[in-house]
Image (tube, helix red, strand yellow):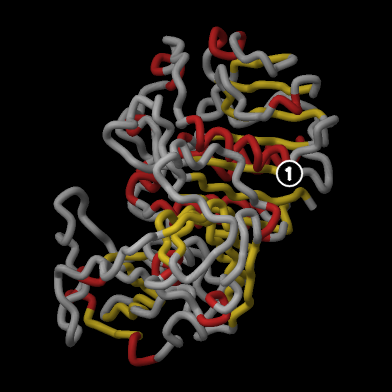
Amino acid sequence: MRISDFALVVDLVDDETEKAIQDKITRTSKMLAQFTLGWQSDWATHIDSQLLDNINVWRDFFPPEIEAQLDGRSAGDRIRHSFSAGEVLPQHTSAEVHRVKAQHFNRNFSSRIKLEPRLGRFYPKGVFNDIPGNYRSNYQPCRIIAIDDESITTDFNHPLSVRALDIEAQIICIWDAAQEHGGRCNDIVEMLTANGPGMQARHDSIATDFWSDDAFVRQDPSPDDAFYAMPRLVDHLDKNCSRQIAELYRRLIPLDGRILDLMSSWVSHLPADFANADITGLGMNQHELEQNPLLTQNLVHDLNQQTAIPFDDQTFDAIICTASIEYLVKPDQVFAELSRILKPGAPLVITFSNRWFPPKAIQAWGHAHEFERMGLVFEYFIQNGDFENLHSYSLRGLPRPSNDRYAGQLTTSDPVYAVWGYRR
C-alpha cells in the first residue's frame, strides 16, 4: 500500500463560517492537513498518520523540502518528500545508548504496576537511575536492547532515527491567519514522530518480550459466556474511527469474496459496498449477531474455550477482527486456525483503538503503550510463520463527532490502529 492510498473519508471541518477560506496557500495562511509518515522495518511496511489543525505556514517549522512545496498549493493537493535516516530526526548515536546496573532500573516507577525490564520493550526514560542528565520526571520512551543478570542496556535514541522516512501532506482546508503574530512555533516532524511511531517494530529483528509477566492473565478469568450473555448493542468506537476502519477494509478486502468477521457483534465495521458479500460472523452473543445486517450467517463460538474454528481448510478470502484481538488468551492457537482456513494470498486484517473491556483484556494489552500493541499483534503474525507482506497503519487526531457521548470530554476521535498480512 502507498501512503497516498490512505485518504481521509470523514467530515473534518464542521464549521468554517468564521474563517476566511483561501483558494491557495500564501505566507499568511493557516491550514488543516493530514500528515503521514511512511517507513519500512525488517518485517513490515508502516504508515503513521495524523490530522494536524491550525498549522501556521509562516510560523511553524517544516523540513525545508516540504516547506518549499507549500506556496501556492490548493486544498486537495498532496506534497511529499523522502528523507534518509537522520535527516529530519537526530542521527542515531552510541552516546544515547546506556548500559546500567540492573539495580538502577526503578521497578517502582509506576504507582499502577510493578515494572520488570524486558527485552525490546519501551519504558519512560525516568525509570533508569544513575544516567547523567536523566531525571525521574523524564517520560520520553526508551527501549531496552540488551539485558542480563547484572546489567541493562537501553537506547535513548528515537526508534525512527535509523529509518528512512517518507513524509506526505494532504492539504484539506486553507484559511487566512489575518494579523496573527507571535505564539507557539510547532515543529511538524516532532508532532508526527512523538509518542509512538517506531515503537511497533522489532529491534534488530529480535522478538520483543511481550510474553513474560503473566501476559495472558485477565482481571476477570471467569468463562466469557457469562460476561457476554447480556447483549451490548452500543458503539464501541466513535463514528469517525469506525468510518476510517470501514475505509481500510474497503481497500484491503475483496468485495465479492467469502469473509469471516472474527469476534463479531451487531456491527461489522464494513462499508455499504459489502451489502451483497458472503459474510460469516463468529461471536459471543446470538442476539448481537442476529442484529448485524451484513451477516449472511452467524456462529456463537468462544475462542478462549475452543480455539479450533469449525470451517474447512482454505474457506475464506479474507478475515477481519475489529476491536477484539485484546481478548484472546491463546492467540498462537487461534492464528494457527486462521491461517488454516484462509486461502493463499488472502488478507487477515486486525484493527483496534484505545478502548476495550478491561476485565476481559489480557494483561499484556493493558501494560503496553498503544503503539507497542501493534508490535504485539505483529508478533502473533511473525511467530505464526504463515503470513507475509505485513503492514501497520495508525491514524490519530481526527475530531471527535459532535454527537458522540464523549464529545464534551475529548476533542479527538478514537485513534485507529491496524496490522495485517497475507496468507502465504
Which residue lies at the image location 66% right of the left edge and 28% below the top edge? 261
Give above or below for 419 relative to 183. above
The x, y position of residue 295, in whole percent, is 70, 17
Please state the total of marks drawn on the protein image: 1
The x, y position of residue 167, in whole percent, is 58, 69
Q: Nearer the viewer, residue 392 or 221?
A: 392
Which residue lies at the image location 59% right of the left edge and 56% below the top edge? 23
Q: Nearer the viewer, residue 150 or 281?
A: 281
Residue pointed to by mark 1: 252
Q: Nearer the viewer, residue 265 or 381?
A: 265
The x, y position of residue 20, in whole percent, is 45, 50
- Quarter holding residue 314: top right
Which residue lies at the image location 47% right of the left edge and 14% below the top edge? 233
Three-letter residue code for mark 1: Leu
Which residue lies at the image location 22% right of the left edge and 81% below the top edge? 101
- Quarter holding residue 68: bottom right
Q: Along the horizontal axis of the image, is 251 left or right of 118?
A: right
